[in-house]
Image (tube, coloured by chain):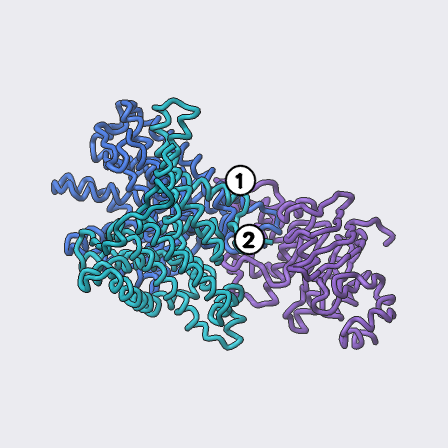
Chain colours: A blue, B purple, C cyan
């Protein structure tokens, strides 16, 4: 058996813990942990998708939460019209997310630095405000759905444990997918292009196009996470797309360490655990959270990832 | 020699904020020659390279490559016609390995890179040409090392490997010996010598030893225009060149 | 055609634009000169409003409240710059964004701790609270006019500062070449601090001026900061002139759009369709405007030119 590095051990332990969690919940009857873990896994998927563009591609998108919202509404709006087919929900979530990423990407990927950050933020707020003004689907008050996505006999999402495992398996699948993408020719171009625009162009790469494709993939994956989120919460509101949500996603990615495959999962985990623990203690826990964030930025830039030692390979 | 013109530059003009960096430059580069471009600082040599590689587009004039007007062609399309360049300030990708850097160069020419599944680094079609290029410049031993921490000389070698890996027809070398010590420079020059004849080289250089060792023809640029073009002997003897060029270098090279 | 309504809305649009300009001008200076992405700018807007509210209540005078809240906001600006921001100038934008995001959490929570979760009202003196007539039949709220006039005065003052004073020259030079300015002996650290504080005061002033209308509330900066960003992107980073034009444009289009888009839609679609789609589209108008302008000019109207 190959010996594992510290990084390998942590990854393994976390994955096993997540895999066995429902068993633990079943034995102890603590439903609450299942709820927490489901939310963790869904946000981990969102963070992992963000890392594709943020970590590997160095595109600082401050509007990624928009896709969570789009995915969630892709479940909510059809449900509102009594369309409960899960395949349709996921299809809409992924396609609309990809389309939104494509259209907004066409505009924002031509810009750099500060402009890019602000524009991605602005576009996500555009969707936010659009949904706020659509009275039909609840507007500011949001949308409540009674029934989760239906996938036929085999997969019954009404069962919380089944939903959890769907999310967990999705996370595993998406992690594997991203791993392949990162090591592929496409991934090489994306990684080469961060901070080396001129070099890549003079080699012959149309970096704009590659970035756009990467941006669309990340958006689509996050849209899928949004569909899972919509099923999980059954209360869907524009709040999900607020730019502060996008900020939290970025925080998760940085906390876990950018451009590492599993980092965002660890970051999402730490973020949610901290949130749970702190909010239980003090009404004004966000103060500590904010200070913690500032301290992390000032002093612990590499995130959890850097505490786990040097990566043997990317 | 006696070859055809591979790159024709006609009346090229580029100004920045009212100051003309290139001021009516006309120049023909012959197939498979090593054509050096020299001149005092501020003559416009670097601007010329960026115009020819498409990084900055000219205000007026024409650039023709093998009969095709490429004046306004974007930078990322030019390598596919057979052009390659090295940068004056080393532009390797620091956090990738030496091999990965060259693989990227090979990949760029090998069709599109919208392949999302197979690992690039284990693909023989990419790694074989890459290793060949690295061997040519003498860097094959460092293939698996991260590029950033290597020495300056090794960075320049890597730059050259990335150029060679694409099997180019026309190469722009922007001060390839910049910042190198004597030993590294000599090695670079002999490497470039071994390239002579296999492709066309446009060489922008300050190091006169390198220029006179390598060049088939030399163009002297002053204030954005070419004041003389010819073989090294002709250039050495040209009075205009002697006057215009603030060159102690010129005089020491003339022995 | 209801002329009163039209005039009032035009005035509202102008006023919103002026407010946006106050926010955006400081921000665009900070972006342009320090290359620093300050998400917490909206927090300074909020802090200004709360200071003004409390001081107005204590001193029973809007003028005194306003006048004293300005230096108070400036002090907060100095503290923020010295304690957090100045360590980040050399870092990349991601760090700026995360740290200032953390600052927003800190400010929002601190404000809640000090003032409680409810908003604070800023009472206006009687003569500002009334109406003023323009021409014969049109009456508009005095305060809105006051905001516009004040904002224009501040804009003029900024213009003089940037184009006619030594500080302004240093600011403009710093915007194009920070290292050079530093090499010429200008104290860059001091210059950055001054620029940051100017931005903070401008933001605070905007908050103080809108406070009487909307009341000072927690998180009030978080939504308007987005609109300020849109203004800066449209105007071009670093350009005060761009910020002014873009702010007025965005302010007018947003307000007029919300009021009149359904009227426009009704001209070529059914009343019912117009009424459901107009609110959503008018909410998106300024972002569509931003996208259109960026498509033609990726650096904004007056931004740094590309190659």
Q: Is residue B213 left or right of residue C282?
A: right
Residue B132: x, y in percent?
64, 53
Residue A45: x, y in percent?
33, 43
Q: Quadrant of residue B111?
A: top right
Q: Is residue C61 left or right of residue A101?
A: left
Q: Quadrant of residue A97?
A: top left
Q: Secondary structure at mark 1?
A: loop
Residue B213: x, y in percent?
78, 67
Give the number of callouts.
2
Image mark 1: chain? B
Q: Secondary structure at mark 2?
A: helix
Mark 1 is surrounded, within 10 Å at the Cα level, by few (under 14), some (14 to 19) or many (20 or more) other residues, namely: some
Residue A26: x, y in percent?
15, 39
Toward the front, the furthest residue is: C136
Q: Residue at the spot x=41%, y=56% of the render?
A: C152
Q: Is residue A5 above or below residue A35?
A: below
Image mark 2: chain? A
Q: Residue at the spot x=68%, y=54% of the render?
A: B51
Name the residue beneath numbered marker 1. B114
Q: Closest to the observer: C2 or C204?
A: C2
Name the residue beneath numbered marker 2. A197
């Amino acid at each position: 058996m190959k010996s594992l590095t510290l990084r390998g051990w942590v990854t393994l332990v976390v994955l096993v813990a997540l895999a066995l969690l429902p068993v633990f919940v079943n034995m102890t009857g603590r439903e609450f942990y299942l709820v927490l873990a489901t939310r963790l896994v869904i946000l981990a998927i969102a963070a992992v998708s963000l890392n594709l563009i943020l970590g590997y591609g160095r595109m600082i998108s401050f509007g990624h939460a928009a896709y969570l919202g789009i995915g969630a509404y892709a479940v909510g709006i059809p449900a509102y019209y009594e369309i409960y087919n899960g395949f349709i929900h996921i299809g809409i979530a992924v396609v609309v997310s990809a389309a939104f990423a494509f259209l907004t990407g066409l505009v924002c990927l031509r810009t750099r630095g500060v402009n890019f950050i602000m524009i991605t933020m602005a576009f996500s707020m555009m969707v936010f405000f659009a949904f706020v003004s659509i009275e039909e689907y609840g507007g500011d008050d949001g949308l409540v759905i009674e029934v989760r996505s239906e996938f036929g006999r085999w997969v019954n999402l009404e069962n919380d444990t089944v939903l959890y495992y769907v999310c967990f398996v999705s996370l595993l699948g998406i992690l594997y997918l991203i791993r392949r993408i990162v090591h592929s020719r496409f991934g090489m171009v994306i990684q080469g292009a961060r901070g080396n625009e001129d070099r890549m162009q003079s080699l012959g790469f149309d970096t704009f196009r590659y970035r756009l494709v990467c941006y669309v993939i990340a958006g689509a994956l996050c849209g899928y996470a949004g569909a899972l989120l919509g099923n999980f919460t059954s209360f869907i509101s524009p709040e999900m797309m607020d730019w502060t949500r996008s900020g939290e996603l970025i925080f998760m990615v940085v906390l876990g360490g950018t451009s590492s495959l599993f980092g965002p999962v660890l970051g999402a985990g730490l973020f949610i655990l901290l949130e749970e623990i702190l909010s239980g203690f003090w009404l004004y826990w966000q103060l500590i959270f904010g200070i913690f964030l500032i301290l992390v930025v000032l002093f612990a830039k590499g995130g959890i990832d850097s505490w786990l030692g040097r990566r043997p390979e990317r | 020699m006696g070859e055809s013109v591979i790159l024709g530059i006609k009346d090229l003009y580029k100004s920045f904020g009212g100051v003309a960096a290139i001021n009516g430059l006309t120049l023909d580069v012959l197939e498979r020659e090593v054509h050096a471009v020299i001149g005092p600082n501020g003559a416009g040599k670097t601007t010329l390279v960026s115009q020819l590689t498409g990084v900055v587009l000219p205000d007026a004039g024409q650039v023709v490559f093998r009969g095709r007007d490429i004046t306004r062609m974007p930078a990322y399309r030019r390598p596919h016609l057979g052009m390659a360049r090295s940068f004056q300030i080393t532009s390797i990708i620091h956090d990738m390995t030496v091999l990965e850097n060259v693989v990227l160069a090979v990949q760029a020419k090998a069709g599109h890179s919208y392949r999302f599944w197979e690992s690039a680094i284990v693909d023989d079609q990419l790694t074989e040409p890459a290793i060949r290029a690295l061997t040519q410049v003498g860097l094959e031993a460092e293939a698996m090392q991260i590029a950033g921490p290597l020495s300056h000389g090794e960075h320049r070698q890597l730059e050259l490997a990335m150029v060679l890996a694409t099997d180019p027809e026309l190469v722009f070398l922007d001060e390839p010996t910049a910042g190198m010590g004597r030993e590294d420079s000599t090695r670079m020059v002999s490497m470039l010598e071994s390239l002579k004849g296999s492709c066309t080289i446009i060489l922008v250089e300050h190091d006169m030893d390198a220029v006179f060792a390598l060049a088939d023809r030399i163009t002297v640029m002053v204030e954005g225009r070419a004041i003389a073009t010819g073989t090294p002997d002709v250039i050495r003897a040209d009075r205009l060149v002697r006057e215009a060029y603030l060159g102690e270098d010129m005089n020491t090279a003339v022995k | 055609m209801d002329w009163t309504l039209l005039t009032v809305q035009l005035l509202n649009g102008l006023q919103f634009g002026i407010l946006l300009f106050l926010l955006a001008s400081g921000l665009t200076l900070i972006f342009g000169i320090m290359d620093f992405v300050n998400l917490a700018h909206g927090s300074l807007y909020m802090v200004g409003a709360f200071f003004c509210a409390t001081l107005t209540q204590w001193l029973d005078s809007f003028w005194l409240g306003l006048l004293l809240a300005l230096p108070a906001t400036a002090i907060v600006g100095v503290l923020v710059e010295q304690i957090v921001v100045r360590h980040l100038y050399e870092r990349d934008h991601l760090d700026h964004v995360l740290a200032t995001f953390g600052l927003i959490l800190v400010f929002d929570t601190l404000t809640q701790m000090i003032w409680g979760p409810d908003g604070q009202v800023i009472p206006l003196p009687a003569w500002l609270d009334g109406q003023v007539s323009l021409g014969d039949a049109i009456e508009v709220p005095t305060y809105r006019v006051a905001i516009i006039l004040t904002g224009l005065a501040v804009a003029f003052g900024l213009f003089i500062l940037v184009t006619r004073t030594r500080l302004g020259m240093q600011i403009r030079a710093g915007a194009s070449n920070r290292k050079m300015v530093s090499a010429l002996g200008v104290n860059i650290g001091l210059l950055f601090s001054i620029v940051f504080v100017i931005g903070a005061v401008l933001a605070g002033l905007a908050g103080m001026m809108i406070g009487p209308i909307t009341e000072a509330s927690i998180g009030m900066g978080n939504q308007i900061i987005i609109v300020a960003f849109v203004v800066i992107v449209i105007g071009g980073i670093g350009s005060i002139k761009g910020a002014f034009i873009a702010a007025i444009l965005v302010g007018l289009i947003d307000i007029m759009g919300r009021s009149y888009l359904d009227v426009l839609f009704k001209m070529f679609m059914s009343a019912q369709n117009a009424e459901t789609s107009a609110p959503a589209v008018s909410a998106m108008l300024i972002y569509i405007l931003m996208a259109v302008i960026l498509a033609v000019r990726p650096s904004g109207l007056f931004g740094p030119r590309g190659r």
